[in-house]
Amino acid sequence: MNLEGSHTINAPRARVYASLIDPEVLQQCIPGCERLERTAPDTYAMTIRAGVGPIKGLFNGTVGMEDLREPEHYRLAVEGKGSTGFLKGSGDFDLHEEGETTVIKYSGKMQVGGMIASVGQRLVLSAARMMASQFFANLAKQTVKPTEQVKTNSAQHSE
Amino acid sequence: MIPSQFDYESPTTIDEALMLLAQNPDETKILAGGHSLIPAMKLRLAQPSLLVDLARIKDLSYVREEANNILIGAMTTHYEIESSSLLKRICPLLPECASHIGDVQVRNKGTIGGSIAHSDPAGDWPAAIIALNAEMVTVGNNGERTIRADDFFVDFLTTALEPGEILREIRIPKPAGRFGHAYQKVRHPASGFAVVGVAAALNFNGNNACGTAGIAVTGVAAKAYRAANVEKALAGKQIDDNIAADAAAHACDGAEINADLYASADYRRHLAILHTRRAIQNALTRASA
């Protein structure tokens, strides 16, 4: 399954790139990410509690950053396994400057298997697209005004 | 397959149901027929710790006619709508849409409210509900809310319902004057879900021109959506086959088209355009009859 798209972030490219490779920012951006710990250079262990509607699952896996070419390109390789299935995929991110803003083009390949894929095949692409759009919405929040935004987020969690 | 352990409550009033739901809204699911939720639980894709069954609450299952509205209780089954002589007369899109859902068992147990609140991207009801400009009446601890269909379906399996809220009623403006309804569907042969489903509700002026058009599409994107450009291309026109075909060509405007093993995005687009045209033509024929 392929997932492609582009998003515009209202921030300079260098800052967007720095956000994309910063594990703390990534943890805030990946929907449902509960843990992102560095285990080796550019490799992280991840726990995601992802859910859409009634369907919820806990996934454990690794995230690797590859092919880092600051500030224009990197690849994110993800592998995860949970009670409802497994996921393996990688996505290339290309960052282009457009005036004051940055356009992120992404193109990924993803394999989903196990229960979630065999019974939910017709739902997988929509779920992936929804998570991608949440990721970029979060990234925009994190990147545009990093310090202020982190404060609002933590305030929302404590409510 | 066996679901993971859960508790079950079957309250007899909606206030009691709201109270149960408020205790732990994230881990609680409302059971309203269960033809999507129970299979998901059996596969352990969903593992709520509490099910609150609405089946014993009186007066959540009805079809009523008011001055300008049709009121449908959220627990009304698909079959009750399919077989309602009142609806066949005053709003035939609803029984027609119901007749296309799943199979006999699903239609006998599944409910309109359950289906709408679940918001499956290939569910049949959301298309009809949007085309008819329905409103969803919800109850929560802060009282009642009314949400327009256009605002209700937010994203993939996601609605405007807040955790802790229950969908109580679907309110549909009564079609007035001369109108024609049609629901066109390509069913998935195994699941019965819509590969593509198109609902059309057209009404006509005295001079045979289309007054307002309601066209909505399900199965194609992450949620059912209003085909606004199709509606614009029909409004005010004396619809003929050419106008129907030109309008239908806009069926997927702005939609991010879904693809799965059964239908690629291109094939889905083709089906959506074809069946939008047929839905318009059928609605037109029925209005003229």
Image: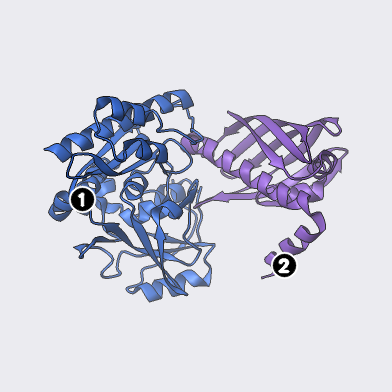
Chain colours: A purple, B blue
- Disc sitting over residue A147 in the figure: none
Who is closer to the viewer here, A157 or A44? A157
Same chain for mark 2 and mark 1? The answer is: no
Q: Is disc 1 surrounded by few (<14), some (14 to 19) or many (20+) residues within 10 Å?
A: many
- Residue position for label 1: B91
Q: Position of residue B73 (x, y in %)?
A: 28, 62
Which quadrant of the structure image shows residue B117?
bottom left
Q: How many marks?
A: 2
- Residue position for label 2: A155
Q: Residue at x 84, y 31 (%)?
A: A68
Q: Residue at x 54, y 62 (%)?
A: B26
Mark 2 vs mark 1: give the one in front.
1
Q: Secondary structure at mark 2?
A: helix
Image height check: is B237 above or below B161? above
Q: Secondary structure at mark 1?
A: loop
Q: Quadrant of the C terminus of chain B?
A: top left
Amino acid bearing label 1: Cys
Who is closer to the viewer here, A90 or A151? A151
Give the left or right position of residue A140, taking residue B157 as reference: right
Q: Position of residue A119 (x, y in %)?
A: 46, 37
Image height check: is A50 above or below A129? below
* Separation of marks 2 and 1 at Cα, in angstroms: 48 Å
Q: Residue at x 69, y 47 (%)?
A: A30
Amino acid bearing label 2: Ala
Q: Position of residue A7 (x, y in %)?
A: 67, 38
Image height check: is A155 above or below B39? below
Q: Quadrant of the N terminus of chain B?
A: top left
